Amino acid sequence: MRDERLFLAFRKYPGNRFTLPVLLGCLEEKGLSQNFRVVIAQSREEIARKVRGKDSLIGYSFMTPDFGQVREEIEWLKAHLSGKPVFLAGGSHPTGDPEGTLRMGFDFVFIGESEETFPQFLRLFLGGTPPSPNLIQAEKRPGRLLDHPPHSLEHRLFAPIEITRGCLYPCAFCQTPRIFGHTLRHRSSENVVKYLKRSIPAGYRQSKFISPNAFSYGSMNTRGPDLGKLEEFLTACQEAGLEGIHFGCYPSEVRPDWVTPEVLDLVKRYCRNRTVVLGAQTGSDSLLQKLRRGHTAEQALDAARWIRQAGFMPHVDFVFGFPGETLEDRKLSLGLIEKMIKELGAKIHAHTYMPLPMTPLFRENPSVLDPATKEALLGWEKKKKLDGWWKEQEVIARKIVKWRDQGVINCP
């Protein structure tokens, strides 16, 4: 018997590996997954081969650094697919530049959180009445806890569970508060346990979580960690059968001003991670102030000391190439890095600034890294004291500036 269901193809690649389990999990929970022939493709060629010219929905969730690849793939698919493919886009880049995403060749763009709007769209599409216009805006969810499925059990796609959305801080280079707002919204311990009890028997082996600032879990203010909520959460995860919990490390760094000996003691008692990822960003106080980070370089150093004293290795994020960054700013960052490496045994995770739509700095050009800074970073890299994709990000940043100046990427 022929399967006449509509194809629903998702392009999977490293940049959206945490997104697809959630989208598919939402479809499964709402009883929609059985209405489609779902394809999870590792390449554009796989999409073309599996869809085989049939009518289809083809979904991309992507970030700005993936813009060039996605644009090329959409052009290629439009040239190689017959039938009536409908192209869907979501994620941080389409949210930041919805009109530009339509110009890439997408038919519908999902803006903001899509756990509800995407299933709603599919129901309408199956009924023959897709929404109009083709920009689909999610409603703001102030105060609403995270309760969407974190995993796809049907496809056995798992990702770290997202436990917090929103950020209290207006960092000028970051999309997070612009997409999710400045109110912290958490996933309750009960909800985490509910999904862990479903996922662990199905093969869930993750032990990490997604949060803009892991130590903010359960807190609703800027005074610091809520130790009671954190301990309740970690205890619940253990009792649900989650083994080897990792907290305060990728993909959830922590802010320097939220690191305390007490919260580190809590992590030490309940978790297995040997590192804590700290977002210092720069060693220049004047630049931190311009970036509206809300902490100082000294606070970052104190936090790294506490992390080391608690028995963890500080793995510290630094970003180079911010707009307006001076040679003196970089010297301060390099000096702080050297102190953290020599005195605290820290490892550095280096980034190069990339302009992102929706952010206050998007229209400003990155600064160019001087030879001495590059030489220092490469030296620590050779000694295995530094890692990160800073060289690749430098190239991507130049491409984003080019696309922005050409009007290919825009910002509302």
Image: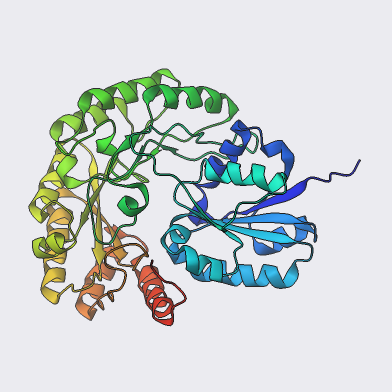
User: Total label count?
Assistant: 0
Can residue 236 be seen from the camera position used here? Answer: yes
- In this rendering, the answer to whether 26 lies above or below 13 is above
Q: Left or right? Give the position of 335 relative to 192.
A: left
The picture places residue 6, in percent across and down from the top left corner, at 76, 48
> Which quarter of the rendering shows the C terminus?
bottom left
Q: Left or right? Give the position of 362 relative to 1.
A: left
The picture places residue 278, in percent across and down from the top left corner, at 24, 48
Instruction: Choose between 70 and 319: the one closer to the eye.
Output: 70
- In this rendering, the answer to whether 340 lies above or below 373 is above
Residue at position x 33%, y 32% from top? 272
Instruction: Choose between 131 and 5: the one closer to the eye.
Output: 131
Q: Left or right? Give the position of 209 relative to 284.
A: right
Q: Quarter-wise, where is residue 141 in the image? A: top left
The picture places residue 340, in percent across and down from the top left corner, at 15, 54
Point out the residue furthest to the right here.
1
> Which quarter of the rendering shows the N terminus?
top right
Residue at position x 16%, y 70% from top? 330
Instruction: Choose between 305 and 31: the one closer to the eye.
Output: 31
Point out the residue furthest to the top here.
239
Q: Quarter-wise, where is residue 63 in the image? A: bottom left
